[in-house]
Amino acid sequence: MKKLLILAAFFLFITSLNANAQQGGGDPAAMAQRMKERVKPQLIEKVKLTDDQAEKVLDINLDIRSKMREFRDLSPEDRQKKGAELDVDRDKRYKAIPLTDDQVKAVNAFFDDMRKQQAEQRRNGGGQR
């Protein structure tokens, strides 16, 4: 009986690991798609963008985030400098969509709020699952 309970507990543990891996990890393209599906409606509603504008903003944001990952090994000063350069590039790309200056500010505020919410969730010991 003990062996059966241990096997059942082990099976549940492995199953939960597999479910978590499928939900949170894996293919970067699939993760990007899930992020777009979750964020795009909020971006359209809060910033008042068209569907096409929101899609382009999300593509730019994902590209910038991937470039920022390359800065992990840099010193804090270099990371800040490179980040500022990426911010300027990002805003130029937003304006090329085209977005107005007010829309660019609203998009940046939207993502700043999103980052703050995520940081708060991490501090409170959880994510959105």
Image (cartoon, rainbow, N blue to C red):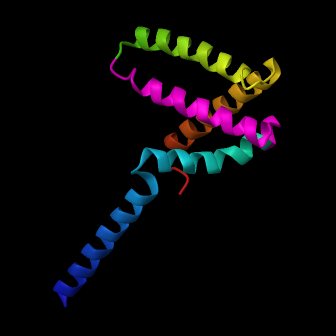
Residue situated furthest left in the rendering: 3
Seen in the picture, residue 18 relative to 10 is either above or below; the reply is above
Residue, x 43% and y 14% (percent of image)?
A: 79
Quick check: can you spot residue 124?
no
Seen in the image, is 107 located left or right of residue 58? right
Seen in the image, is 16 located left or right of residue 107? left
Q: Is residue 58 magenta?
A: yes
Q: Is residue 1 magenta?
A: no
The quadrant holding residue 51 is top right
Decide whether the magenta segment is chiefly helix, strand or loop: helix
Q: Nearer the viewer, residue 99 or 15?
A: 99
Seen in the picture, residue 116 relative to 6 is either above or below; the reply is above
Seen in the picture, residue 52 relative to 64 is either above or below; the reply is below
- The image shows a total of numbered marks equal to 0
Residue 3 image offset from top left, x and y in percent: 16, 84
Seen in the image, is 68 located left or right of residue 87? left
Residue, x 41% and y 9% (percent of image)?
A: 78
Quick check: can you spot residue 109?
yes
Which segment is the magenta one? 45-73
Residue, x 61% and y 13% (percent of image)?
A: 88
The quadrant holding residue 103 is top right
Residue 100 image offset from top left, x and y in percent: 81, 21
Residue, x 28% and y 75% (percent of image)?
A: 11
Q: Quadrant of the N terminus?
A: bottom left
Residue 22 image offset from top left, x and y in percent: 41, 59
Residue 83 image offset from top left, x and y in percent: 51, 16
Residue situated furthest bottom in the rendering: 1
Seen in the picture, residue 43 relative to 3 is either above or below; the reply is above
